[in-house]
Image: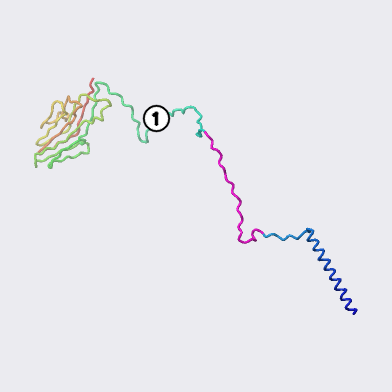
Amino acid sequence: MKQYGLLAAAFGGTLAVLLALFFVFEQLSAGGGTAVASPSPSASAVAGTPPTPAPTPRLTAGPLPSGNLRPTLVPSDPPKPIPTPEPTPKPGQTARPTPTPVAAGSVVQIVVAGRDYIHAEVPANGKITKLADGGAELRTTRVSSDTLTVTYRLPLAKLPPGVKNGRVDAKVCGKATGDFWETYGPTGATPAEYEYLPPASDGCWHYAGASLADTDLFAIINLETTFRVDRVVYTVTIPK
């Protein structure tokens, strides 16, 4: 019996201690005691919930300025003219002198080489050979009586600037042999032609008193003939 009394006393003491602890716990809970905070889950721990983006600030356009927006030009001094440089001759090129007017009564002589005819009519039995010394040899045969004709003309571009009229004298220098040859001077010249005649002592057929209006001159041959034209000389006299 004594043992039962000790067990009962021990059980009662233990129960009293437990009740006391329970009472203290209830008091702390009811009185707002400090509770141990559990850690909040981080944003990365919550699966499937994307972070909310921060709002992007909008720019609100203000009122546009009124009036003329073009820049105002400040007047300045007018630009000074740039002097035009004198043309510089290219390497190997000589500057041309300013031509001087030809005085009235002056005489200008222009030589045309025999090979520098402006036109030729050559028949089947004819031939023209341009010679190394500048002349031209005209030749025909008796195969036919067709004529061979060459035409010469005063090159007006070789006259001094401003010369538009004047007296023209001309001469055809060379020699001829064979059946037939003749020369015709410029329009208005005296004589009009030389036919089957030898040249003068200077080796030329002379024509005088023509004009710049028509300076064509002709040398003509046919049958068995050879005519060598060395040069044609034009002499222009400027009127007073």
What residue do we see at 88% from left, 78% from top?
Answer: 4
Magenta highlight: main SS? loop
What residue do we see at 11% from left, 41% from top?
Answer: 141
Question: Of 221 and 29, which appears nearest the observer?
Answer: 29
Magenta residues span 42-66
* Residue 205 appears left or right of 163: left
Please identify the quadrant where the N terminus is shown.
bottom right
Q: Is mark 1 on a helix, strand or loop?
A: loop
Please identify the quadrant where the C terminus is shown.
top left
* Residue 36 appears left or right of 154: right
Question: Of 177 and 236, which appears nearest the observer?
Answer: 236
Residue 48's place in the image compared with 236, above or below, is: below
Give the amino acid type for the residue marked by disc 1 in the picture. Answer: Glu
Q: Does the magenta stretch include residue 141?
A: no
Residue 72's place in the image compared with 238, above or below, is: below
Q: Name the residue under label 1.
A: 86
